[in-house]
Image (cartoon, coloured by chain):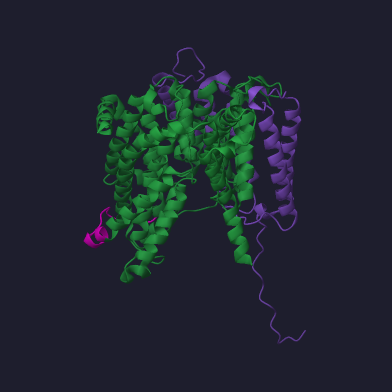
Chain colours: A purple, B green
Amino acid sequence: MNAMERSPPSSPPTQPAHSSHSVVLQVLLSLGVLGVAALLAYGATQIPSEAGYAGIGPNFLPWAVAAALLVCGGLLLRQALTGGFQDLDQASGAPRADWHAWAWVSAGVLANAALIEYIGFVLSCALCFTLAVRGLRLAEGKPGGGWMGLLRDAAIGLLLAAPVYWLFAQLLAVNLPSLTATGWI
Amino acid sequence: MEIFEQLMGGFATAATPVNLMWAFLGTALGTAIGVLPGLGPAVTVAMLLPITAQVEPTASLIFFVGIYLGAMYGGSTTSILLNTPGETGTMVTAMEGFKMAKSGRAGAALATSAIGSFVGGSIAIVLLTLFAPAVADWAVQLGPPEYFTLMLLAFVTVSTVLGKSALRGLTALFLGLALGLVGMDQITGQVRYTGGVLEFMDGIEVVLVAVGLFAVAEAIYNAMYEGRNVSTMNRLTRVRMNRSEWKRSWPAWLRGAGMGFPFGTIPAGGTEIPTFLSYATERKLVAPQHRAEFGSTGAIEGVAGPEAANNAAATGTLVPLLALGIPTSVTTAVLLTALQNYGLNPGPQLFQTSEALVWALIASLYIGNVMLLLLNLPLIRLWVKLLLVPKPMLYAGIMVFATVGVYGMRQSAFDLFLMFAVGMLGVLMRRFDFPIAPVIVGLILGPLAEAQLRNALSIGEGNWSVFIERPLSLGLLLIVLLVLITPRWLAWRRRA
């Protein structure tokens, strides 16, 4: 190559493709809709069709919705296979998911669900808050904060969960689980 | 003048200290919710539905409606200062309002938005007072076939009119209908789709789906995709308008209110259409010397009109809810659930059977509107401070409230697990541009529509022609077809 020739300017670093445009995911999604339609149809076969005066029984709408979802799923699949979903607004945010952050937030929500009836609303929600905050902060790229950070988040969680509990359980008589029988924690 | 007497009676109830307190709490909370990202009036009301077990109906409805209206006011603040619309109805405000804020006129934008919302809301409330009872009286003629076709129209408009893809909207609707099928059939008692799981016998709780799809999904989506988004806030200037800004604003307010209210009352999917229409109108009608401001430094008419339209439309959606029992947006659908929790059946008979409640609610709208003007003009700095809460704390805090809402309804930890699953579904839907509103409307309205369908067929003795034989029902069916076909036909013509 002639040394006088300029080499082409380097292209900008390529962004990973936006996951909403991924054909694989769109096909999976469409298959999911078809799967739901199949489940509905299977369930509908188990529902008797006693019609009474109405002319249609309790199995009419299940069949109708199953058929409608079958059509929708089919059309979605066709769109996915022939160039992707039409008129797709690119979803906001990063092209790829931050699974680390997701893991923390999900852990918070699931731990809350698992423990709330054993350790009561206040402690369970404080735990949920602590784990979720850590995940969301990780998503922003900010440091986790180590042990002090964890303690601080837990304290804030308690400061939030306790008054909320007192407000709803004591004042508004909403039935929320408690750790002790005093009704305050 | 019977209306006037009923309204005065409503004021007597709405102005009691307890109800005033609830109105204030609702409007204040609504404003806060509108300002904060991540929560909307629908999911907030859904999370607070457990209070219906204890608080009496008038008070809680005043509270919920206060939240609804407050969110309309609060949403404009975020649109103007942060360019992230707090509510979908304030998307248009984000266009011109944000531009005004960037050119240093945030205060004027906020002022015109608050006063415009007040004007729009007030006009709409007066129209509601005059029209709702009349509609309820007329609606006595409606039978199950008409109700079914009205609900069908609501389904179709909420799925296809907004958003880019009718296919995805309809898929979401059918998913919502499918969720509504789980549990015991109302008419025959037949158990459907429980799969032997005991917790499904009572159906899937509305609060669970609403909170899961909106709040939980929002938090998880943020963690997965939006962590690196940085939003910059515009500087807040003094909230007032000068004389020329007033002169330009007030005709826009009146036009906006005039457009907003009718759209709110019909099943047209909520507040987006009238706000965009108002924006387009203001753009056409603006005086030539100010035309250049649109899209560059921000024209005040582009904020004034849409804000009035958006509040008028939101108030307008209460007309079909109270007079016909038909919700036309997600928030009104959740309000319907609140009414059902009290065993009150919304519909034309609501004006007869619960006259005191309905008029107290309407009177409280007037009161709430005034409260909102006071909360939003001088106190705006307070709300703006809320925006300083770091996002991680905000979304994690929302999880705590979500737990209250979902667990508080049925005291079931299983519901919390299901809420997580629904949340993941919401993330998927958001990622692939499936609208969420149709799921909620399908879930809430689906069982009601099914009941009306079967009643209609009973009347017609099993003949489907009953829908075509009755003129009103036929007319509504034709409108449904029009709504489905017109956009497709227009696009086809454009391509040809």
Q: Is residue B421 visible?
A: no
Camera-nearest residue between A185 and B181: B181
Query: Which quadrant of the view contains residue B183?
Result: top right
Q: Residue at x 67, y 57 (%)?
A: A17
Q: Is residue A179 visible?
A: yes
Q: State the image coordinates of residue B451 (x, y, percent, origin top left).
A: 58, 28
Q: State the image coordinates of residue B352 (x, y, percent, origin top left).
A: 37, 25
Magenta residue span? B234-247
Quarter of the picture containing the N terminus of chain A is: bottom right
In the picture as drawn, the residue positioned furthest to the right comes out as A1
Q: Indicate left or right for A48 with B76 as reference.
A: right
Q: From the viewer's perspective, is residue B347 above or below residue B257? A: above
Camera-nearest residue between B142 and B448: B142
Q: State the image coordinates of residue B135 (x, y, percent, origin top left).
A: 39, 37
Q: Indicate left or right for B442 with B318 as reference.
A: right
Q: From the viewer's perspective, is residue B489 above or below residue A136? A: below
In the picture as drawn, the residue positioned furthest to the left comes out as B243
Helix, strand or loop for the magenta stretch, by majority:
loop
Camera-nearest residue between B470 and A115: B470
Q: Residue at x 52, y 34 (%)?
A: B147
Q: Indicate left or right for A45 with B3 as reference.
A: right
In the picture as drawn, the residue positioned furthest to the front comes out as B469
